[in-house]
Image (tube, grey):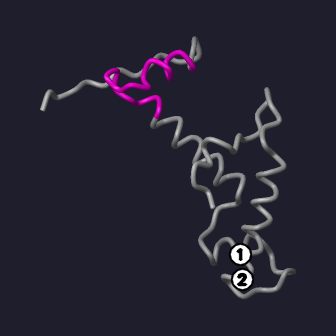
């Protein structure tokens, strides 16, 4: 369900609204799946169901995936074909990470 979520799901921030509608709709689907997985009723507390099913709330899961993708992109070595584009996209906000190669 979340294949390539880091490309099309943008969490809400102070600068942009993000894709809040899609995140809410997918969150509702996750809620329905959570009820089927655990076999609970709709009136059961969501926090308790999440603890039993070992699931994150959907908006937190989206933030986790986007942060993982951003960390992966920021840690690319300079020899990677995408490194220049990532550094350009970061602009003045962060210094690009320079990975030290072992030469092996």
**Is 69 in front, or is 42?**
69
Q: Quadrant of the image for the N terminus?
A: bottom right
Establish if 71 lies above or below 95: below
Q: Horizontal placement of 86 versus 38: left or right?
A: left
Q: Which quadrant would the C terminus be assigned to in this image?
A: top left
**Eyeballing the image, is 63 above or below 24?**
above
Check disc 2 and report its element: helix, strand or loop. helix
Residue furthest to the front in view is 81
> Farthest residue toward the right?
43
Q: Secondary structure at mark 1?
A: helix
The residue positioned 76% from the left and 67% from the top of the image is 29
The percent position of residue 41, horizontal first and vertical second, equals 82, 85
Residue at the extreme left of the image, as rendered: 104
Magenta highlight range = 73-89
- Residue denoted by label 2: 36
Answer with left or right where residue 10 lies relative to residue 64. Answer: right
C-alpha gap between disc 1 and disc 2:
5 Å
The residue drawn where x is 61% and y is 56% is: 2
- Where residue 77 appears, x then y in whole percent? 34, 26
Image position of 98 with respect to 48: above or below? above
* Contact, mark 1 vs mark 2 (Cβ under 8 Å): yes
Of the pair 104 and 48, the residue shown nearer to us: 104
How crowded pointer 1 is (Cα within 10 Å; few <14, some 14-19, many 20+) is rated as few
Q: Is residue 67 magenta?
A: no
Residue topped by disc 1: 33
For the point 53% across and 35% down, the residue is 70
Residue 86 is inside the magenta segment: yes
């Amino acid at each position: 369900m979340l294949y390539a979520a880091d490309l099309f799901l943008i969490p809400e921030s102070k600068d942009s609204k993000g894709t809040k509608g899609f995140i809410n709709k997918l969150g509702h689907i996750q809620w329905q799946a959570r009820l089927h997985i655990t076999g609970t009723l709709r009136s059961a507390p969501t926090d308790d169901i999440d603890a039993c099913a070992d699931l994150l709330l959907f908006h937190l899961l989206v933030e986790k995936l986007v942060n993982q993708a951003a960390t992966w992109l920021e840690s690319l070595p300079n020899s990677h074909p995408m490194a220049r584009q990532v550094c350009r996209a970061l602009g003045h906000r962060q210094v690009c990470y320079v990975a030290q190669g072992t030469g092996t």
